[in-house]
């Protein structure tokens, strides 16, 4: 029952975040909505017996990818600047309340699934752990893993190449 | 009430649909890109849920590989958006119509 409650709460947060991503006029609010969706999906991964995927979700998506998004948004500028000075008096208590609620639900999720181990599904002490996934990745899917290494290297090189993209037309104009 | 994989699949479908709507409706390249990320995440959720349902670990491994591809895609995509913005000073995809026949 506790799993259902946690699922419903974070599914609602994920849906609200996704909806805000699509509807927000300000790009920064879109990024924040996506961030909320990413975090709630990480909690849902915990509910679904995938603690390692949940941790990777937070590190890669909420950490690296969203930071990159916010960096690019700030670099190329927000299209429609909103009234940032419009602060309501109840903003701080509402923020504290939301943070406290988030923490309590995360604590509940940790008590029910992560720390105690899931009951009634497969191998509770092994399933979804880093060891089990490493066993699979480095045992069965080694070639795929090495391909992703190559893919990431190519992506990094491509980004560097794109960063110098502007130099070529300038050189053509000179000659 | 038991938490079955149907709930996860429904949520994944809803998130994917919202992502599709975002790609189709919004014209800001960054928002479209974030909607793409949302769709990838929705698929990841279905992978993990079905993996739990079948008692297999392969679904979680697939979700990890999707994350790797998404990270590479974000790097390249944002580099392209920045490159376009530097030459065009706009992130609106409707203004990029030079290749139109």
Image: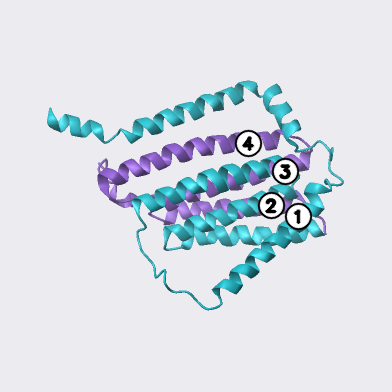
- Report the side of A11 relative to A71 (left or right): right
> How did the renderer colour the structure?
by chain
- Do the CB atoms of the residues marked 4 and 3 lie less than 8 Å apart? no
Spot occupied by residue A113 in the image (x, y as percentages of width and height): 79, 50
Q: Chain of mark 2?
A: A
Give the mark count.
4
- Do the CB atoms of the residues marked 1 and 3 lie less than 8 Å apart? no
Residue picked out by circle 4: B64
Spot occupied by residue B99 in the image (x, y as percentages of width and height): 27, 40
Residue picked out by circle 2: A43
* Labels 2 and 3 within one chain: yes
Shade representing chain B: purple
Shade representing chain A: cyan
* Labels 4 and 2 within one chain: no
Spot occupied by residue B22 in the image (x, y as percentages of width and height): 47, 55
* Residue visible at 40% across and 48% down in the picture: A72
- Image quadrant assignment for residue B84: top left
In the displayed structure, would residue A6 be above or below residue A45? below
Numbered disc 3: secondary structure? helix
Residue picked out by circle 1: A109
């Amino acid at each position: 029952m506790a799993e259902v409650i946690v699922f419903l709460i974070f599914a609602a947060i994920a849906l609200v975040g996704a909806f805000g991503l699509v509807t927000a006029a300000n790009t920064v609010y879109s990024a924040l909505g996506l961030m909320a969706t990413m975090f709630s999906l990480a909690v849902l991964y915990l509910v679904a017996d995938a603690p390692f995927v949940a941790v990777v979700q937070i590190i890669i998506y909420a950490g690296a990818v969203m930071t990159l998004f916010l960096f690019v948004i700030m670099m190329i500028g927000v299209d429609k600047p909103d009234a940032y000075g419009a602060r309501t008096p109840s903003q701080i208590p509402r923020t504290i309340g939301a943070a406290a609620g988030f923490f309590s639900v995360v604590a509940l999720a940790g008590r029910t699934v992560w720390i105690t181990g899931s009951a009634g599904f497969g191998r509770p002490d092994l399933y979804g752990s880093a060891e089990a996934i490493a066993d699979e990745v480095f045992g069965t899917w080694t070639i795929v893993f090495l391909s992703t290494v190559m893919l990431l290297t190519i992506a990094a090189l491509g980004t560097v190449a794109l960063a110098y993209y502007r130099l070529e037309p300038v050189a053509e104009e000179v000659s | 009430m038991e938490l079955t994989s149907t709930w996860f699949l429904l949520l994944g479908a809803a998130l994917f649909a919202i992502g599709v709507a975002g790609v189709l409706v919004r014209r800001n390249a960054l928002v479209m890109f974030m909607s793409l990320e949302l769709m990838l995440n929705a698929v990841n959720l279905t992978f993990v849920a079905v993996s739990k349902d079948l008692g297999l670990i392969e679904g979680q491994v697939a979700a990890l590989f999707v994350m790797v591809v998404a990270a590479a895609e974000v790097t390249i995509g944002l580099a392209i958006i920045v490159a376009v913005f530097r030459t065009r000073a706009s992130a609106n995809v409707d203004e990029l119509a030079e290749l139109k026949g």
